[in-house]
Image (cartoon, coloured by chain):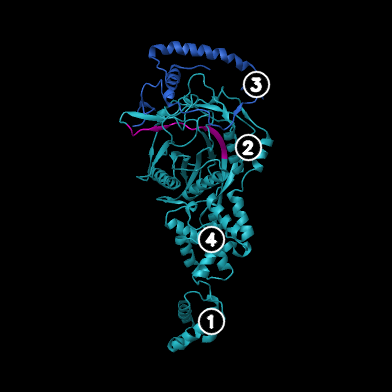
Amino acid sequence: MTATSGKLMKGATGDWEVVIGMEIHAQVTSKSKLFSGASTAFGGDPNTHVSLVDVAMPGMLPVINEECVRQAVRTGLGLNAKINLRSVFDRKNYFYPDLPQGYQISQYKDPIVGEGEVTVELDGGKTATVGIERLHIEQDPGKMLHDQSPSLSYIDYNRCGVALMEIVSKPDIRDAEQAKAYVTKLRSIMRYLGTCDGDMEKGSLRADVNVSVRKPGGPLGTRCEIKNINSISFIGQAVEAEARRQIEIIEDGGVIEQETRRFDPDKGETRSMRSKEEAHDYRYFPDPDLLPLEFSQAFVDELKAALPELPDQKKARFIADLGLSPYDASVLVAERESAAFYEGVLEALADRARDGKLAANWVINELFGRLNKEGRDISSSPVSASQLASIVALIGEGTISGKIAKDLFEIVWSEGGDPRELVESRGMKQVTDLGAIEKVVDEIIAANPDKVAQAKAKPQLAGWFVGQVMKSSGGKANPQAVNDLLKSKLGI
Amino acid sequence: MSVDAATVRRIAQLARIAVTDAEVPHLQGELNAMLAFVEQLSEVNVEGVEPMTSVTPMAMKKRQDVVTDGDIADDIVKNAPMTENNFFLVPKVVE
């Protein structure tokens, strides 16, 4: 595995390369918790989604939720990773109020998923490959509120025991853009698979980011881990801030101490979280309450056969079948909902080969552009997939021009209605009748002898005539026909 | 393998068990006696033998993904020294 080189950072002593590895904690989509029958629903009054197992009452025993196992295997398959038919649950011992057991049930030496790799999308249609080290299943801890009282922490165990997938990357990431693209891609894959909702605001997806710096090609530097970043843009900011901090320390003759840090988005800086004397000693050992997790290759094959089409496959299909550019294809497949909308448009098109590419342009530029401007998402689009398909088909078959189509889009967006009927009832049809266009062209040429003379001398002035003809036809004249006619009439 | 006094204090700290300095030598002796006892196992050659995680040849039981528990917040917090609106309250763990 070779990492894709990233953007170097400038220091006083020259360029520095940033080396990044990530641990992503993704909440598994399931109805009940990993080892208990309590609900995983977000929200809920304090401690209402809690069973006696989750708070480690004496005598309670964990029993694994088979759906969580399936979800982890699906995710592993989505990451092109090796699935381990036998894995082991271990106790990760630590004493903290967010976990009443005194240990987190996790997987240490034998995770359910081994090595894999993902392709991530960078600016300008470029890609990079990031290696996956492993994926293991573990329990989410409870939630602590520290701002309710000056002397007390408030604890709610509703989240405690919900299944998490910890996905560990190899240190293959080289700059902030790649780091963001990696998380974006993992989130997209899991949302396609339905294994994690990827809702970062609700904490369903959190990232720990390991950052170190080195001279390009030199030995690896000492890394610092920035814990629990819960937004993709903060991940980028944290990487930049931490790399900058490390470069400054080294260039001032200092030494980087390996430590855990926290990103403060308000100040745009990372801060030390734990001092060394508190260094953790987790004393992992196999959980005696749980047998090894074993399943057959047939179980894996069955899950594999039922996987939905993933973003990379969809992207490749859009490029091969419809001739989309890699960039357009990756924009369309990035979110499952966007891809579904575009496929809805395709579904409603009579001539996909002719209009598929045009439809992609319209979805990306007109629809996404407009949705972004109004801060709406695709699920609340006022223009449906079939309405957009009609607009695109009207352009494709030459009934309306692209310019008129934008007006039509506006009408459909704000008033709704069937685009085809709107074109009829509002007289928006493109005039392709050459005779009619010629009449307008002749009139304008006759009325502007001075401009005609100018245009003959300077052919680029013909654009003025095109504008006049389009204006006088209310934008409905076929622009190609207008151009051709003008050229021959003006003799240019 | 044996433990020194500092290791005894560290193990106690990790387990959140209060151990006075006076108790350390006694515990150190007990722990070392246990370790010496277990040490006998190292005489057995386990080259290529997988660690045993269960004495019965059985597969792990799995549950279906169904919500069968919860809505017992009053019971959950019943033994807590301090609660408010069914939150557990503990001495503040961050500054």
CB contact under 8 Å: marks 2 and 3: no
Q: Which residue is mark 2?
A: A83
Q: Magenta residues: mostly which secondary structure?
A: strand
Q: Which residue is mark 3?
A: B46
Mark 3 burial class by Cα count in 10 Å: few <14, some 14-19, many 20+: few
Residue A436 badge = 1
Alpha carbon distance from label 2 to label 3: 27 Å
Q: Is residue A347 left or right of residue A201?
A: right
Q: Earlier in the sequence, mark 1 or mark 2?
A: 2
SS class, disc 4 = helix
Which chain wears cyan? Answer: A
- At label 4, the amino acid type is Leu
Q: Which residues are magenta?
A: A133-148
Q: Is residue B82 left or right of residue A473?
A: left
Q: Which residue is mark 4?
A: A388
Q: Chain of mark 1?
A: A
Chain B, which colour? blue
